[in-house]
Image: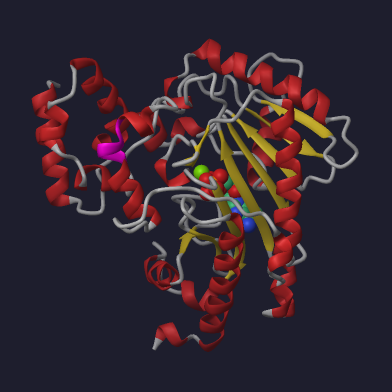
Amino acid sequence: MTIEKIVGEIEKIKRIYPNNLMARFFNANNFSNLSEDDKYRLMRIINTGIKNPTSEMGAYAMYVDDYEKFSFQLDPMIRDFHNIPAEHPISQTNDWDTTKARCDLGEIDPSLKKTSMRVRVARNISSFPLPGAMDKSQRIDFEKLAVLAFDRLADNPDFGGKYLSITPGTANTISNQEYKNRVASHQMFKDMSADKYLNAANISAHWPFGRGMYISQKEDFIIWVGEEDHLRIMAMQTGGNLNSLFERLHTGLKFVGDLLPPFAISPKYGAIASCPTNLGAGMRASLHIKLPNLCADDPKLERIGNEAKKLGLAVRGASGEHSGAGEGGLVDISPSARLGVTQMQIMQTLYDGVAALWKLEKSSAIRE
Ligand code: ADP
Ligand code: MG
């Protein structure tokens, strides 16, 4: 397709799919002023939103400097998604001080102590292209670099564990059955080659080379290698104590950060991530929670999604993004904003939002 045709295609998407942020903020004038090389670079970034008009964001960065370089296209999308008003600069401040608040789900309802809690951050290493622009040997080299760090992490008394690779033929490669079991237990990521959004951005290319996960012996600290970002670092726990979950991640993140080359971090955008939705704290803190009343007769989770949105939350299905509710109305609830909010604000938004949704669930007010 010629550039003119692609621009026409984007203008069409803008009319038909107003929620596609890439198309909504695409400016043909700005685009035409770019050099031929930069036109090509920007096209690679926004290809996923063109190929998938129903995208909500519709862009994946390919290189760490894409955000600065193409800020005229990406900043308005970022502001819209993360809810940053025009009069505020885009910027990221961090605050991991969990002593400031007490977020114990058991205080909302004792039954919520059983809730599965997960908090992850996206991190990328500055010396590699982002996953959408990596060739096969870079993916393999990146995994080798990560394994060197994990070899050292494995000796740590608190975070010791093992690395499970799905790259064919390595010393750490696991069986297909073990891979499937780890996906079913929500520890490992799904087959990316089945994801049309990632495919259009080349993020899933060379699957499954360069992919794997580190898991601590207690199975509460996990690091994904080679998914949508170079690394997804996460803590997973039950017990209802969000403070302890966040502390676990923070301590582990500091250890891992010291074992690896520097992460790509910008004062403006925070942690650089492939997807603009994951900038800033790069953090998604989620609860797997059963809300049968709120999910009743709502296979696409639209009604509960609208309620959650008012509380700054997003709803995903029980198997992650683009999945449906699980048994008993099991859904994944997480704060949407990740940039311009501190880690502690994310924890508080999750806690307050879930308290409100729980009340709604118990009163079933949404159904009347
Ligand atoms: P992310 O994009 O934040 O990494 P995904 O939506 O891709 O998350 O989901 C990744 C996996 O994590 C899926 O298996 C999902 O069900 C699982 N997951 C998310 N939140 C929780 C949670 N609170 N408890 C258990 N598993 C979770
Ligand atoms: Mg994901």
Residue 249 in the magenta stretch? The answer is no
Q: Position of residue 274 (x, y in %)?
A: 45, 34
The rendered magenta stretch, by its main secondary structure, is classed as helix
Point 81% across, 23% down: residue: 151
Report whether residue 93 is seen: yes
**Relative to 365, does residue 66 appear above or below in the rendering?**
above
Q: Quadrant of the N terminus?
A: top left
Report whether residue 55 is seen: no
Q: Position of residue 163 (x, y in %)?
A: 75, 28
Apparent side of residue 329 relative to residue 235 in the rendered image (left or right): left
Total label count? 0
Point 12% across, 35% down: residue: 28
Q: Position of residue 56 (x, y in %)?
A: 32, 49
Point 64% across, 20% down: residue: 143
Q: Position of residue 19 (x, y in %)?
A: 25, 53
**Relative to 245, does residue 276 appear above or below in the rendering?**
above
Apparent side of residue 120 relative to residue 357 in the rendered image (left or right): right
Q: Tell me which corner region of the image, top left, top right, bottom left or bottom right, holds residue 211.
A: top right
Residue in front for this viewpoint, 262 or 158: 262
* Magenta segment: 70-74
**Relative to 140, does residue 255 appear above or below in the rendering?**
below
Figure colour scheme:
secondary structure
Residue in front for this viewpoint, 5 or 268: 268
Apparent side of residue 90 relative to residue 175 in the rendered image (left or right): left
Q: Quadrant of the C terminus?
A: bottom left
Residue in front for this viewpoint, 343 or 108: 343
Residue in front for this viewpoint, 241 or 323: 241
Q: Tell me which corner region of the image, top left, top right, bottom left or bottom right, holds residue 158.
A: top right
Name of the residue lying farthest toward the top: 137
